[in-house]
Image: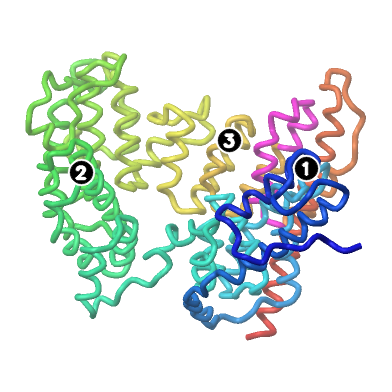
Amino acid sequence: MSSPSLPVDSPAPGAWEELVTTALLGTDRRTLPGCPPGQEAPVALLDLAAVETVRRRAGLRPARAAERPQPAPEEPRPALPPAAARRLALLLADRPGTGSGRRGSAPDLMELLPQWLAAANERGFAPPPQALPALLDAARGRTDLRPAALTFAGPRAMWLARLNPDWRFALRTAPGGGAAAPPLEDPAQVERLWQEGLFAERVALLAAIRAREPSAARELLATTWGTERAEDRLMFLDSLRTGLGPEDEPFLEQALGDRSRNVRATAAELLSALPGSALAARMAVRAGACVAVDHTGDAPTLTVEAPHECDAAMERDGVVAKAPPGRGERSWWFGQLVEAARLGTWPGRLGGRTPEEIVTLPVADDWQGELHAAWCRAAVRQRDAEWARALLGSPAAPEAGGPGAVSLAERAKLLATLDTGERAEWVAGFIATHGLSEAFQLLGVCTVPWGGPLGRAVVDALNIARDAGSYPWSFSGVMGLAERCLDPSEAGRLDGLLAIPDEPEDASPGATGYWAESFQRLVTTLRLRATMIAELEGSEAVRT
């Protein structure tokens, strides 16, 4: 059966759109010129579409060939051992959205990925090239994973990120947008990027130089400081936290006169973190004038006379004059003065007493909470471990509260100023006395893995909570932390907790089974973590 003859002259404008419309409506309702209705109309329509397709393709003018991408950079690091590479693939396959999920007593593989990446980075391994897409996808979905993931992925991740818009976050996250900072020996290149780069590139450049040579970064910032926008000045100033030292004081003192309140406040915060700064000394004089020792009573007592006004000099030094809603102005000003004052000046002003002796002195007229809370903030800002110990007090104290630690969040911040061993020992004592119900924030500041007394304290407290018939779901957060943070060597001590005991009459329905499942998952996870490290360490031993 032959098709009707096809017109061979040039198609009319809009011919393709006419064909598409006819196809959508159907040849029974619409026909084309030269295509009579009937059974062969559909065949004729398809023939016309085929001819028009050829015409459209033949009529395209060839475009200029796109520039070939540069080859991926070489990877100088040693490849992962085969067992570790297989483990990485399993961890990445468990990311959210893959359908594997976490069920029953099975370990949460995605939560183990950060530890695996940290261990691989410590050993200097490079990822398998085929794992890079999944690794970048995982980092895209979890911002907390990005630093370790991009360090492990290396320069090839930056190469891929320039080719796939979904991975552009890597260019923003990596210093310099994925490129190395210009060498300091080439000031022209540094100056060009500083003057002409995008804001994110300039922030990354300043941070990269600050990490390598703090004075060079500060001098570079000073060249354009007066012309920067207020919000940009604030971001740039924040970069000086890295490597902050006495040589930064003149620049920060200049920033105290900035027209932006936020910039002034940040400059004042940084200066107060320098114990020898003039601002810290000025604040110490102001704060010291507000606090005195009263010897007229039966025992020495601290008295407080808060400032009656916030003058211009105080505002220039970072004191915010307007108090938050519900807060008295005088107590607000007083707290800011004490927070910014050098802690080292208080023993001399208060009779030569040590920090431990100072914080045990009674404070008159209900000022103790305000004074001690300000000392807590000062200890954290100045990283003063001696004052932090005094304010924390004994972990076995009633209600686990030190003299100045008015909240668990404050205690956690104070603990962060102590070395890792002392921090873990204090938290272990807290748990031994008060259990786990209030310990979640404190555990979060302890260095991983939890070994020694801290690990044993956590395991013992979980066992006590189970035997006491405690509501198990209230411990799920601590149990999740334990899976990630307990030393894998603790797995052997948990074997005795895997049996399912008889459920007490007053226990929550299903609580015993939940505890058993949780302990099973904890033991399985700890053993898996031990295997992961062995896969890396054993292969490293062979390589070295």
Whole-percent x, y for residue 73 in the image: 51, 80
Considering the numbered disc 1 on the image, is that residue within a helix, a strand or a loop?
loop
Q: Mark 1 — residue? A: 26
- Side (left or right) of 471 relative to 225: right
In the rendered view, does 324 fall on the left or right side of 422?
left
Q: Dot 2 corresponds to which residue?
A: 230
Discs 2/3, front: 2
* Viewer-proximal residue among 10 and 272: 10
Residue 381: percent from left, percent from top: 31, 43
Front disc: 2 or 1: 1
- Give the alpha-carbon distance from disc 2 to disc 3, as whole Å: 41 Å
Mark 2 or 3 closer to N-term?
2
Q: Residue at x 58, y 35 (%)?
A: 439
Q: Amino acid at mark 3?
A: Ala
Local SS, label 3: loop
Identity, as a three-letter code, of the amino acid under mark 2:
Ala
Please state which of residues 413 and 388 is positioned toward the viewer in this rendering.
413
Which residue bears the numbered disc 3? 439
| CA distance for labels 2 and 1 | 64 Å
Q: Which residues are magenta?
A: 462-488
Q: Residues within 10 Å of mark 2 (few under 14, many from 20)?
A: some
For discs 3 and 1, the disc positioned in front in the rendered view: 1
Image coords of residue 359 (percent x, y): 33, 31
Q: Is the Cβ of the residue at disc 2 closer than 8 Å to that at disc 1? A: no
Estimate the x, y position of residue 224 in percent, counting from the top left.
Answer: 15, 57
Residue type highlighted by circle 1:
Gly
Residue occupying the point 64% across, 49% down: 18
